[in-house]
Image (tube, rainbow, N blue to C red):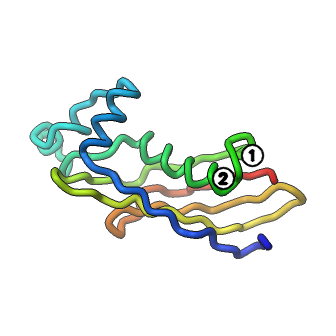
C-alpha cells in the first residue's frame, strides 16, 4: 500500500568512464570535461564529471521503473547542485530514492534524492506519477 511517507526502495547505478564515453557517443555531447581528466582539471573541476543529463536520465529511469512505465510519469524536474565525479578506473555510485509526499486520487507526488559518494547531486528533485 502506497501512502504519504512511503520511501521507495533505493536503487544504485554505477557509472564509470566507459559509460560516460558511451553516453557521449549516443548523445553527441563530446565536451571534454566528461572524458579528459587533464581538461577537466584545467577548467577547475576535481576530475572528469558525468553528464548532467545522464544523471537525470538515470534518476528518470528509477522513477519510470517504479511508476510502471514512462506513460505514468507526468512531471519530473530537478536542479543540478553538484557534479558526479568519475575518477579513472573506478565505478562510482549514483544512489537514488524517493519519498511519497502527496497522494491526490491517482496522482502521486514524489520527492527524489540522488547522491554520489555520499554527496547530494540533485536538488529540488520531484516527480508526479499517475497510477
The quadrant in which the C terminus is found is bottom right
The residue wearing badge 2 is 127
Viewer-proximal residue, 131 or 127?
Answer: 131
Left or right of residue 87: residue 98? right
In the rendered image, residue 67, in percent from the top left (x then y), is placed at 70, 53
The quadrant in which the N terminus is found is bottom right
The residue wearing badge 1 is 72
Viewer-proximal residue, 2 or 104?
Answer: 2
Picture layout, residue 106 above or below residue 25 = below
Left or right of residue 43: residue 125? right
Picture layout, residue 69 above or below residue 111 = above
Label of residue 51 in the image: none
Residue drawn at 27 percent across, 53 percent down: 85
In the rendered image, residue 118, in percent from the top left (x then y), is placed at 35, 69
Circle 2 residues within 10 Å: few <14, some 14–19, many ≥20: many
Real-space Cα separation, disc 2 to disc 1, in angstroms: 11 Å
Q: Nearer the viewer, mark 2 or mark 1?
A: 1
Residue drawn at 46 percent across, 55 percent down: 122
Amino acid at each position: 500500500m502506497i501512502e504519504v511517507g512511503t520511501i521507495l526502495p533505493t536503487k544504485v547505478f554505477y557509472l564509470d568512464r566507459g559509460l560516460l564515453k558511451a553516453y557521449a557517443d549516443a548523445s553527441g555531447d563530446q565536451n571534454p570535461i566528461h572524458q579528459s581528466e587533464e581538461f577537466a582539471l584545467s577548467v577547475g573541476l576535481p576530475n572528469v564529471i558525468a553528464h548532467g543529463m545522464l544523471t537525470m536520465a538515470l534518476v528518470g529511469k528509477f522513477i519510470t521503473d517504479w511508476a510502471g512505465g514512462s506513460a505514468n510519469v507526468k512531471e519530473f524536474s530537478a536542479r543540478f547542485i553538484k557534479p558526479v565525479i568519475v575518477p579513472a578506473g573506478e565505478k562510482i555510485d549514483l544512489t537514488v530514492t524517493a519519498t511519497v509526499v502527496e497522494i491526490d486520487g491517482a496522482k502521486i507526488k514524489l520527492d527524489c534524492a540522488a547522491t554520489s559518494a555520499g554527496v547530494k547531486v540533485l536538488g529540488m528533485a520531484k516527480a508526479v506519477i499517475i497510477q
